[in-house]
Amino acid sequence: MAASRAAIRELFRREPSDAHTGLGLVVVASVLVAVVWVPQAGAVLAGGFAALFVVALVVALFLGRRRGGAVRAAYRFTFGWGGWVSF
């Protein structure tokens, strides 16, 4: 059971640089969508990620993390997928 939990933690462990990449990609994609289609579509894309961040922040606070730790955890959860993108 301990090895299984360690594997899950390693899978979801994200560095802040991964989250920075994910945030940058969301910003670029939102601007691109707003320019190519309509500005409302870009706003919906950005708003969806903002809503996911708020939900992750509320969950982190509910689980007992302090303010700074909760913000970092929510940020890494929301945008940590940026580490899986390779250029």
Image (cartoon, rainbow, N blue to C red):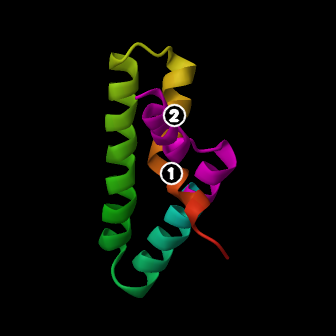
Residue 20 lies, in percent from the top left, at 63, 52
**Which residue is at a point 45% across and 69% down the rendered structure image?**
30
Mark 2 packing: few (<14 Cα in 10 Å), some, or many (20+)? few
**Which residue is at a point 35% across and 64% down the rendered structure image?**
45
**Which residue is at a point 51% across and 47% down the rendered structure image?**
11
**Tag 1: residue type?**
Phe
Relative to 3, residue 31 above or below = below
Q: Is residue 20 magenta?
A: yes
Residue 56 lies, in percent from the top left, at 37, 35
Nearer-N-terminus badge (1/2): 2
Q: Nearer the viewer, residue 20 or 50?
A: 20
Q: What residue is pinned by disc 1? A: 79
Q: What residue is pinned by disc 2? A: 6
Relative to 81, residue 10 above or below = above
Question: What is the CA distance from the residue labelled 1 to the residue labelled 2?
Answer: 22 Å
Q: Nearer the viewer, residue 69 or 43?
A: 69
Place residue 48 in its image quadrant.
bottom left
Mark 1 packing: few (<14 Cα in 10 Å), some, or many (20+)? many
**Tag 2: residue type?**
Ala
Give the mark toward the camera: 1 or 2. 2
**Which residue is at a point 51% across and 34% down the rendered structure image?**
6
Residue 42 lies, in percent from the top left, at 38, 69
Q: Is residue 62 magenta?
A: no
